[in-house]
Image: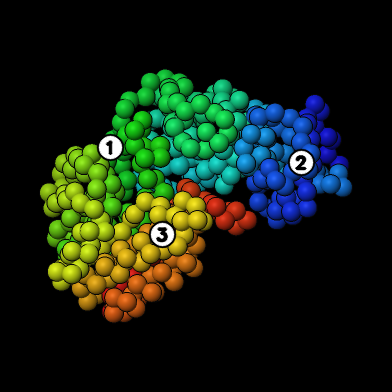
Amino acid sequence: MAKRAKGVSEAVVGGRGAKRVRAGHPWVYRSDISEMAGEAGDVVRIVDRGGKFLGMAFANPRSEISLRVASRREEEIGERWFRARIEAAVEYRKSLEIDTSAYRLIHSEADGIPGLVVDKYGEYVVLQIGSAAVEERLGVVVGILEEALSPSGILLRGDIASRRREGLSQEIRVLAGDVPEGVVVREGGVKYMADLRGGQKTGAFLDQRENHLAAGRLSRGRVLDVFSYVGGFALHAAKNADSVEAVDASGPALEAARKNAELDGIENIAFTRANAFDLLRERSDAGEVCDTIILDPPAFAKSKRELAKARKAYKEINLRAMKMLSAGGVLVTCSCSHHLSRGMFEETLRSAAGDAGAAMRVVEWRGQAGDHPEVLAIPETSYLKCAVLRRM
């Protein structure tokens, strides 16, 4: 029998919380805790009301998610523990044989370190920390990353919403070495500039990498890329398409996309600043036809309360796109809304196809890239849906 960790506080979890932990989910909500000792950033033992050990967890009484299970064994959560988890994550990424210089190295709970995200952009590393416990051990984490990766610089992107919920400061700062504003990275056969300090997430949508590559292989003829951001899909589509039109409501995003096209020597992309809903409605009403359409909108449903409105929005853009597709044309359509399940998304697409009068064949269902692993017992790790459909 493992020895009880010395000097560690304890949290008693009620029946619902204990059942959740035993099922493999790492989160325990404040409402499911009967008793709790310890402060924000502490590591605590979790037990059920009968005193049976459930796991070691990162604690934060200030947060709605007050406990995050870090280990299901009775063990010390110290430097040795972090080193083992980080080294395992590095080895797992090596096994994926990723064809890029930018990828996710540590994916929080999916790599066994709740609240820690680490992305690698060439010789630079960017961290996101959404756990007070990891923040308190930041020096240990940075030291291990320096030993394992020998990066030129490590940056903290501490501007994520989860930090506010954990009571952590909002800040962007260099933790080690020097980090430029942006860095050119390679993704398959294209290059782009990742904005490490001001870009979405840690600088780019790394979770879409494999979908970018797949869409590029499928793209033919006239391509319409809506919600293009800085051109992730458009750049790959342009390799095989006759022409690509990248549409986004953000002028700065389109300017970044234009510069990325110049970086790659791509000349068959046009850039249009427009509201996606208005453009799709006007183009479909006018009878315009495209051979490939890509839809990668932001999360329309950031909470369960927004689901009904979000489903209407997803249906609208997909209905319009389906109407515009040529016979044999391909639609690559995505949703990054966790609260919209794959089943809901599929039902929404089915409804859109029916109203559009378009018979659509399913080519494949895709998700986030392999360096953003899903954990069976944690539905939140399965958030990105990508359907590839072909008009019959």
Q: Is residue 273 left or right of residue 217?
A: left
Place residue 176 in its image quadrant.
top left
Q: CA distance from mark 2 to mark 3?
A: 37 Å
Q: Amino acid at mark 2?
A: Ile
Residue drawn at (34%, 37%) of the image = 199
Residue drawn at (45%, 26%) of the image = 171
**Image coords of residue 163 (percent x, y):** 52, 33
Which quarter of the figure is the N terminus placed in? top right
Residue named by callout 1: 193
> Which is more foreground, mark 1 or mark 3?
3
Q: Amino acid at mark 3?
A: Ala
C-beta proximity under 8 Å, tags 1 and 3: no
Is tag 2's residue or tag 1's residue first in the polypeptide sequence?
Answer: 2
In-front residue for pair 45/110: 45
Q: CA distance from mark 1 to mark 3?
A: 31 Å
> Which is more foreground, mark 2 or mark 3?
3
When the figure is inspected, residue 334 is found, relative to residue 351, above or below; the finding is above
Is tag 2's residue or tag 3's residue first in the polypeptide sequence?
Answer: 2
- Residue that extends furthest to the left in the rendered view of this protein: 267
Residue named by callout 2: 46
Which quarter of the figure is the C terminus placed in? bottom left
When the figure is inspected, residue 176 is found, relative to residue 185, above or below; the finding is above
Residue drawn at (70%, 53%) of the image = 20
C-beta proximity under 8 Å, tags 2 and 3: no
Q: Is residue 193 visible?
A: yes
What kind of element bears circle 1? Answer: strand
